[in-house]
Amino acid sequence: ALVLSPRINMNLNFSPKTQTALAVAAYSFCSGSLVLVNKLILHQLPYPSLVITFQLWATLFFIQIGDAFHVLDVDPIKWKCIKPYLAYTVAFSLGVYCNMKSLSMSNVETVIVFRALAPLLVSVLDAMFLGREWPSARSWVALSVIAVGAYGYALTDEAFQTQGLIAYLWPTAYLIVISFEMAYGKKIISAVELKTRTGPVLYTNMLGWPPMLGFAYMGGEYGRFYNDLTDRAVRDEPLFSTSAVVLMLLGCIVGTGIGYSGWWCRSKVSAASYTLIGVLNKCLTVLVNLMIWDQHAAVEGIASLSLCLVGGAFYAQAPMRKTSHDHAESGGNTPSKDEERQQEMGPLLRRGNGESKP
């Protein structure tokens, strides 16, 4: 199991319930903030792959500085750990790229509503590959509500009306990739033995930036970047505006934070719960987005999106499927520790070890 560095211990001797709540809060804050920050960055630096590459490098720089000054404990790089993280890194890189492309071609609400559909696919993957039961009737209803909300949003989205299905090409790709990433990420977090919280962050960022540079090449970002810098130099303008530099620094900080908080949260909850947390924490993103952008969705679209979030809130995590071998070992009625953890935070309205919030 993953443990935090003794030098920087985010658990702070809190109870498991409090640790889970803190992990969820940290991940929610970083996730919602990064969507908005990256949207602001892309308005000034329209190079999604290069922006993400720089953020990944910044996280690696932070890790190396922390290790050099003995602030962080860092897992050594081993081939046996690299191999399982390669598949995850491919999904991670594709997910980030699809997300950035979606943000550059559409609005924030479109990305959020497609992310709201991810619990449906993750639930299927849970049942097919991760040993879970199929969702209960209540959960199927909740997932259906999410699908209805997504459809309602599509009917009111101006991009859908003017561009048709092509407006949803990148969001759809993002949905498929992120669903695989959520399921596979939960599997490797228990299968790969890393001793520090920095380990997963190190491997994903170390393996993630080369594919992003490839995406930048395929998207023609190098040429656009060179031409923009040349034009600025000819006009005797600063190569980068002060606001662009500040936003990039902020993006690097939040990007590093989501790396740590994301793996911390993933270690505390199940795959589907982790996916739903990512959906529900976008509520704040929508509210802030409405106050910033002039391309936000209509009132009907926001209502449809809210319906998606309501459905996600009432989704209950399916329990682990009991095998005959586990049933015999447990005496037929005692769940394993892993099963107890997998069932934590079934409905996202519950906290900690499944106790209802008073």
Image: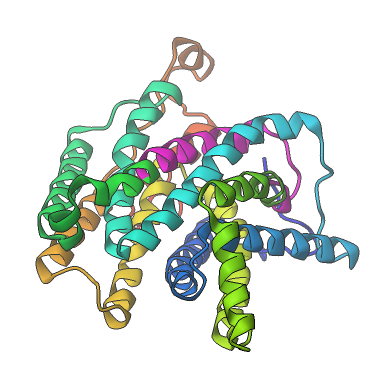
Q: Is residue 89 above or below residue 56?
A: above
In the rendered structure, the answer to whether residue 257 lies left or right of residue 82 reads left
Let me know if residue 80 is in the magenta part: no
Q: Quadrant of the N terminus?
A: top right
In which quadrant of the rendered view does residue 288 lie?
Answer: bottom left
In the rendered structure, the answer to whether residue 102 lies left or right of residue 41 reads left
Name the magenta segment's main secondary structure: helix
Frontmost residue, 344 versus 36: 36
Frontmost residue, 316 versus 227: 227
Residue drawn where x is 41% and y is 20% of the image: 322
Residue drawn where x is 62% and y is 71% of the image: 253
Q: Which percent across, then down, holds residue 156?
A: 11, 60
Frontmost residue, 29 versus 231: 231
Residue 290 appears in the picture as rendered = yes
Segment colored magenta: 175-200
Residue drawn where x is 19% and y is 68% of the image: 297
Q: Which percent across, then down, holds residue 170?
A: 35, 47
Q: How is the image coloured?
A: rainbow
In the rendered picture of this protein, how many numbered marks are placed on residues?
A: 0
Let me know if residue 184 is in the magenta part: yes
Q: Which percent across, then down, holds residue 112?
A: 31, 57
Q: Is residue 131 above or below residue 86?
A: above
Residue 11 appears in the picture as rendered = no
In which quadrant of the rendered view does residue 246 lie?
Answer: bottom right
Q: Quadrant of the C terminus?
A: bottom left
* Residue, far front: 234
Frontmost residue, 338 versus 27: 27
Q: Which percent across, then down, holds residue 108?
A: 32, 64
